Amino acid sequence: MKPLVMIILLSCSLYSNSIFAQEQQVVVPYTLADRDRAIRTEVKMDTKFEAVNARIDYLFWLQGVILAFILFILGYTIWDRRTALQPALDKATDADAKSTNLIRALREYSKKHADLAEILRIHGIL
């Protein structure tokens, strides 16, 4: 009796495993044509992304060139103003030195002439 029960239990367990195995099988809704189509679509998308990345790289380079040009123009403007301003500063320094010399000469001359001393006092030079 025991061997018979064992055989029945063994056959039931084998049968139940085949039932569970059939339930676990998943039917894939894709065919080989679908897989090939998905691969072709992926390749097309990769090429499009590469083209977009190339354009973005080009735009970064273009922005860099424009920024460098703007900085160059700004630097040139500052340099040109200093260059153009230097002669004016030299003339102003020269005029300041001449006016200082003229004031000294007028003060020396006003020591001998009282009317000039009075005029210089009125204008705040003496």
Image: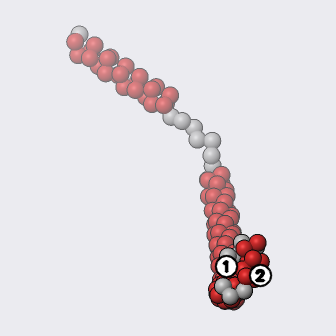
Q: Which mark is residue 114?
A: none
Query: What residue sits 63% from the left and 49% below the top?
Result: 31
Amino acid carrying mark 2 in the image: Asp
Report how far apart the C-alphas of labels 2 and 1 lie in the structure. Answer: 50 Å
Query: What residue sits 65% from the left and 62% below the top?
Result: 49
- Which quadrant is the N terminus positioned in? top left
Between 34 and 78, the residue placed more toward the observer is: 78
Taking the image as shown, residue 14 lies to the left or right of residue 59, namely left
In the figure, 39 relative to 77: above or below? above
Element on which disc 2 rests: helix
Among the 4 quarters of the image, the one containing residue 74: bottom right
Badge 1 local density, few (<14 within 10 Å), some, or many (20+)? Answer: few
The location of residue 19, given as percent across then percent down, is: 46, 25
Taking the image as shown, residue 26 lies to the left or right of residue 18, namely right
Amino acid carrying mark 1 in the image: Ile
The location of residue 7, given as percent across then percent down, is: 29, 19
Q: Which mark is residue 115?
A: 2
Q: Is residue 114 visible?
A: yes
In the figure, 23 relative to 77: above or below? above
In the rendered image, the residue lying farthest to the left is: 2
Mark 2 or 1, closer to the camera: 2
The location of residue 63, given as percent across then percent down, is: 68, 70
In the rendered image, the residue lying farthest to the top is: 1
The location of residue 68, given as percent across then percent down, is: 65, 76
**Is tag 2's residue or tag 1's residue first in the polypeptide sequence?**
1
Element on which disc 1 rests: helix
Q: Which mark is residue 78?
A: 1
Between 35 and 62, the residue placed more toward the observer is: 62
